[in-house]
Structures are given as C-alpha cells and as structure tokens.
Image: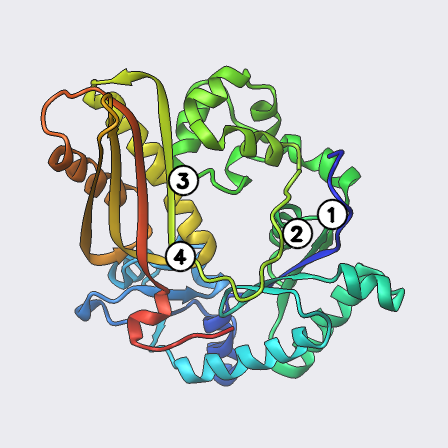
Amino acid sequence: MDGQARRSIIHLDMDAFFASVEQLDNPALRGRPVIVGGSPRSRGVVSTASYEARRFGVRSAMPTGRALALCPTAVLVTPRIQRYVEISRRVRRVLDDYTDLIEPVSIDEAFLDVTATVATTGRSATAIAREIKERVARETGLTASVGVAPNKLLAKLASDLKKPNGFVVLDEAAAERLLPEMPVRQLWGIGAKTEMSLNRIGVFTIGDLRRMDEGLLARLFGSRAEELALLARGIDHRPVEPRQEVKSIGAETTFADDVRDRERLASALGGFADEVAERLREHRFLARTVTVKVRLADFTSLTRSQTLPQPTDEEDVLQGAAVSLLDRAVPGSHPIRLIGLAVSNFLRPGDLYQANLPF
C-alpha cells in the first residue's frame, strides 16, 4: 500500500436504517423480521429489511412478493419517508460538527474525510469516529456501523466487517493481513457475474486477483484493470467528494483486435452489466435508462438507449437490454473495436414512493 498520502477516512452506515426506525418507533417490531416496502399487489419493492429478515435472503430492491415468499413471517411496513428524512438530518447534523468533507452515499450512509480535523485538533481519527458513533446512537436511538481507515475502500470494508453496530479500525498493516483472504467480491466493482467468471479461472480471493497475470487482467477488465490491481493491494486514491451528484455509471473497453463474434460481445456486455450493477448498489441507485456505445472498425461511433419499464440494479436485466440495444445498433457481424454500457436516469429505492431522501 505504498505511495498513498496518509488520510483519515470514516465510513458510517446506519444499520438497516428504515427497518430500524420502524422498530425504534414500534417496540412490538423489535426482534422480528421487518420488511419496509411497497405492496406486492402494486409490484412494490423492498426498500430495507431488518437483520432478522435478511437471514432469510431478503435484500433491498427485491420485489416485495419474492421477499415475503422467502420470509413469510415478516411484517411488511409501508415506508414513512418523512420520518426517515427527519432522522437522517439528525445524523447529518452530527457529522457536520466534525468536517466539511462529507460524501453522502445515500440517506443512511456517508464517507467523511477527517484528515484536517485530526491535524487541527490533535485527536485521532479513531477517537473522532467513536464519538460520532456514540452521538448518533444517543441523538437518534439507532446504531451505525463505522469503519476507520486511510482510504475509502478500506473504510467501507471496515464498516462491513462487524455489522450491525460495528466499529473497526483498519490500518495498512491490518488490511495487508486481511485483504488477501477476503472473497474477491468484496472489492468495489466486482459483482456476482464477474465473481463467477473469476472463480472459473481459479480466482476466489483478493490475493488470487493480486497474483493474476497483468495481460489477462487487462483482457478481462479493459480500462479498469489498473484500478482493480491497485484496489486489490488496498490502494484507493478516490477523494471524499462533497455534494457529488452522479449522473451516469458506465464501463467500456477497446479490443486489441476488432471483434465480430456476438457471443464475445454479449459476454463483454455481461461483464459491464455486472460491474455497473455493483456500482448501482454501492450508490443505492436504481437505473431507468440503459445506453450501449459501439465504435466500428472504421471509427464510426453509434449509441442506442432504452428506458426500462421498471428501474433496476439487476445484472440480468441490464445485460438483456444491452444485448438488445447492440442488435439494434449493429445488426449483422460488423467488426467492432470498442463497446460500452452505461446507465442513467437514477432513482433510489425510496424514490419509488415519490419522495426526496436527502442525507
């Protein structure tokens, strides 16, 4: 992890936020599986599930009907968006007392860069993070999982290690011990399909990814290969970006040789769909619009877009739409030198209830 400037990054993630609010306000729900979401009769989706429900495989953005089939004893609760916003604002007021460098990921999750706070106050990032965690609990009645590390990747990994109500400090030495044994899926940008593809070639852990041949890594991940190689070593130079507004998420690659084979092109789009879906889930977004970009051998560039009937973060849906768009853009077997997939027109799961969810 050599070469990265020393920073102090905190990742705070409220535990099962919407469901925890419901359990806070209604003691009869405590200890019971709770699903916050829309009615299955209106094609509703899960916004949040309590940890008791998650043990049955229930997760955010899953159709409510499927969630109730997995966990028939769950209590389905209609979202109370304004209540969640009220508590989210309390959390934000706590965070604002420690730094101006706050990057909201969603209504219940944020990164903080407290490097300057550490320098000016003489307090450690660990002490600051612990105080934030204690204040959030005291001022909201809810728990948060908190990770402290020198970069965003490690801070996020740290906050995930002991959920719920976790507190983990992950320095470079500890990360160097833990990272190689972690499943490769733990890395930002590695989704279910990419994980399966890597497993097929014997890559199961982050340590396995580190040992991959650079050429093979480039063929599999294109322009993202270098970034993934750095992340596998725990190096993440991404800054904490206040007021960040993500307009689109995408991935593309330029082939070493022009490609005509549709199966290979579909496979590339599948890898992109996997990566994009993972990043959508990281941002807690659902995408409504899918765009495919193609550059032919003669450098002609083509794009085709489709607005989906339902917003999604599902790999299969994105790949299906992308392959259909590729067929529309380039019928036949024209040689293609570049292909890419992007999604835009975002919603958050809570936005399905026509509410604004600021954090």
> Seen in the image, is 25 located left or right of residue 143?
left
Q: Can I make out residue 37 in this image? A: no
Residue 155's tag is 2
Identify the residue shown where x is 28% and y is 63%.
64
How far separated are the C-alphas under marks 3 and 1?
Answer: 25 Å
Identify the residue shown where x is 74% and y is 64%.
129
Residue 275's tag is 3
> Seen in the image, is 313 located left or right of residue 15?
left
Secondary structure type for disc 3 = helix
> Seen in the image, is 1 located left or right of residue 306?
right
What's the amino acid at mark 3? Glu
Residue lying farthest right?
A: 122
List the residue tagged with mark 4: 59
Residue 134's tag is none
Compared to residue 182, the image places residue 104 above or below, namely below
Compared to residue 355, the image places residue 312 above or below, namely above
